Image: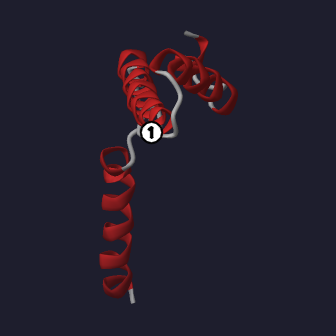
Amino acid sequence: MIKRLFPSAAAILVLALCAGCLFPKNFSKEKKDSHVSADMEKEFRQRWMDKRVGDLTAQGLSPAAAQAQAAAEFNAKYSYTSAAAK
């Protein structure tokens, strides 16, 4: 009977000792680089603005009016981003 329990107990002991290797304490605490986020938001804003200005100028608005309208729409639609604050 003891010979049957030994492999199970040994496996549990090995898993308990390796748990720190498999599941490190800081596993869920990823470092977020704020510069990357800001750059991504700026790029998103630029691409969105370019597309929207193109759409508005195709509808007949002047480039300056299209730029102003696109900026207002972006700020209203994506006000939660830091790119909308600019």
Indicate the quadrant where residue 65 lies. top right
Residue placed under numbered mark 1 in the picture: 58
Q: How many marks?
A: 1
In the image, what residue occupies the spot 45% across and 20% down?
63
Instruction: Tell me where residue 39 appears, x and y as whole percent.
Output: 36, 20
Quadrant including the C terminus: top right
Q: Nearer the viewer, residue 43 or 21?
A: 43
Q: Nearer the viewer, residue 42 or 32?
A: 42
Quadrant including the N terminus: bottom left
Q: Is residue 3 above or below residue 34?
A: below
In the image, what residue occupies the spot 38% across and 20% down?
33
Q: Nearer the viewer, residue 24 or 83?
A: 83
Instruction: Tell me where residue 54 appears, x and y as whole percent.
Output: 41, 34
The local secondary structure at tag 1 comes to helix
Mark 1 residue type: Ala
In the image, what residue occupies the spot 49% across and 22% down?
62
Residue 47 falls left or right of residue 78: left
Specify how the rendered protein is coloured. secondary structure
Q: Is residue 50 above or below residue 14?
A: above
Question: Residue reaching furthest front?
Answer: 60
Residue 70 falls left or right of residue 28: right
Instruction: Tell me where residue 60 appears, x and y as whole percent.
Output: 51, 34
Crowding at mark 1 (Cα within 10 Å: few <14, some 14-19, many 20+): few
Instruction: Tell me where residue 26 appears, x and y as whole percent.
Output: 43, 33
In the image, what residue occupies the spot 48% across and 35% down?
52
Indicate the quadrant where residue 42 lies. top left
Q: Nearer the viewer, residue 25 or 70?
A: 70
